[in-house]
Image (tube, rainbow, N blue to C red):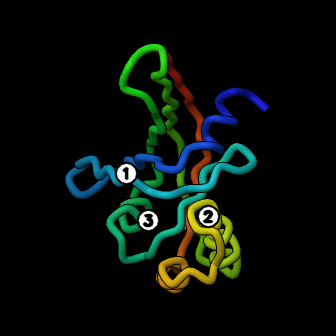
Amino acid sequence: MSSQDKFLRSQKVLRLATIGKNKTPHIAPVWYLYSSKKIYIGTNTKTQKAKNIKKNSRVGFCVDVGINSPDIYGVMAQGNAKLILDQRVKKIAKRILLRYFDSMGNESAKELLEDTDCIIEITPEKWSQWSY
């Protein structure tokens, strides 16, 4: 496994950029799962990011850490996103939530799972990374 893969599996917050009305960027911090070279994000179809992806599948994202050298590292990518709206949603959403909660017995985890009605699946195409 590459250092980039290990990094993406270890981090918890991804900043997702979608393209909104009038080609205006919309950037949202999200919880995610990195698996099989793809990014998965649980959300609701009523969110701005989901609405934007319905209209334009091009997205970008960034995951980074550190504020002082030599501990600064980040990964960015651009790619295509699609909304998963079928029976896989709850299964993937549980995998995402279990990165952040000890169990699905947590009330907040239950509420988030209930509210998740789609998964954003990102297939990254162009990667870049940096470290200082």
Q: Position of residue 26 (x, y in %)?
A: 29, 52
Q: Residue sitting at 53 percent across and 24 percent down?
A: 128
Mark found first going from the N terminus, 3 or 1: 1
The type of residue carrying mark 1 is: Thr
The type of residue carrying mark 2 is: Ile
Q: Position of residue 56 (x, y in %)?
A: 41, 55
Above/below status of 20 relative to 97: above
> Mark 3 or mark 2: which is in front?
2
Q: Quadrant of the N terminus?
A: top right
- The image quadrant of residue 55 is bottom left
Residue identifier under label 2: 96
Q: Residue sitting at 35 percent across and 54 percent down?
A: 28
The type of residue carrying mark 3 is: Lys
The residues bearing labels 2 and 1 have C-alpha atoms spaced at a distance of 20 Å
Q: Residues within 10 Å of mark 3 (few under 14, many from 20)?
A: few
Residue 54 is labelled as 3
Residue identifier under label 1: 18
